[in-house]
Image: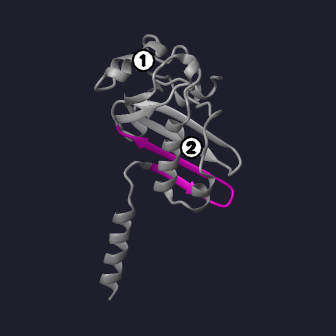
């Protein structure tokens, strides 16, 4: 009997495992979530004032750090080439509206998911909110080697993200002191 209960618990743990999630803490007062996404293709939406066509673009691997106290949200975002846990080399996020911290001005979060969702559902919600909000301004004009606006336009026709444009950061603390 004990072996079948342990096997069932193990099956549930494996079934509920999400390899994207690095850290997840949720309580009545707040949620803290750190997760990663692999390189892939995401729809990037741009404000019409930027004269950049919205569409599917290659995106590098990303490390996300999300926090909410159920009233206010914050999101930090960095790129990486290879995930090595604490030894992962981080790069500036190659997007508009970011400088380590993400400007969440036009983001809409599904607060119900925060209250009721598990780590995977909250992760999906954060990704969806980020990519469904329009990029409107340069957060860090020095985010990449090159021009971030030009890269944003050129990515529309690329089949993979050019990793050579990524700029390393000194530390997470250095990035968090930047302002939009």
Q: Nearer the viewer, residue 72 or 30?
A: 72
137 shown above or below 20: above
How far apart are labels 2 and 1 at the CA level?
27 Å
Q: Is residue 135 magenta?
A: no
Residue drawn at the location 69% of the way across and 44% of the way down: 72
Which residue is situated farthest in the left direction here?
Answer: 159
Q: Which residues are magenta?
A: 22-38
User: Residue at label 2?
Assistant: 66
User: Residue at label 1?
Assistant: 153
Which residue is situated farthest in the top direction here?
Answer: 146
Q: Nearer the viewer, residue 84 or 144?
A: 144
137 shown above or below 125: above
Q: Position of residue 154 (x, y in %)?
A: 38, 17
Q: Could you tell me if the residues under marks 2 and 1 are in contact, i.e. CB atoms within 8 Å? A: no
Which residue is situated farthest in the bottom direction here?
Answer: 1
59 shown above or below 149: below
148 shown above or below 43: above
Badge 2 crowding class, 10 Å Cα cut-off, few under 14, some 14 to 19, many 20 or more, is some
Badge 1 crowding class, 10 Å Cα cut-off, few under 14, some 14 to 19, many 20 or more, is some
Q: Position of residue 23 (x, y in %)?
A: 49, 50
Dot 2 or dot 1: first in sequence order is 2
Residue drawn at the location 45% of the way across and 22% of the way down: 53
Specify the quadrant that holds the N terminus. bottom left
Identify the element where label 2 is drawn.
strand
Residue drawn at the location 68% of the way across and 52% of the way down: 70
């Amino acid at each position: 009997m004990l072996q079948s209960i342990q096997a069932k618990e193990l099956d549930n743990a494996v079934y509920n495992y999400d390899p994207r999630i690095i850290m997840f803490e949720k309580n009545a007062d707040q949620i803290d979530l750190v997760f990663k996404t692999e390189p892939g293709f995401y729809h990037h939406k741009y404000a019409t004032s930027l004269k950049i066509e919205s569409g599917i673009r290659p995106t590098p691997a990303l490390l996300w750090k999300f926090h909410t106290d159920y009233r206010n949200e914050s999101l930090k975002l960095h790129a990486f080439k290879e995930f090595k846990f604490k030894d992962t080399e981080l790069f500036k996020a190659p997007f508009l509206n970011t400088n380590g911290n993400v400007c969440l001005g036009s983001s809409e979060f599904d607060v119900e998911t925060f209250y009721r969702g598990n780590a995977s559902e909250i992760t999906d919600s954060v990704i969806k909110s980020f990519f469904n909000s329009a990029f409107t301004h340069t957060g860090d004009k020095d985010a990449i080697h090159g021009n971030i606006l030009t890269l944003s336009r050129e990515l529309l026709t690329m089949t993979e993200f050019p990793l050579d444009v990524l700029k390393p950061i000194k530390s997470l603390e250095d990035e968090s002191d930047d302002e939009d």
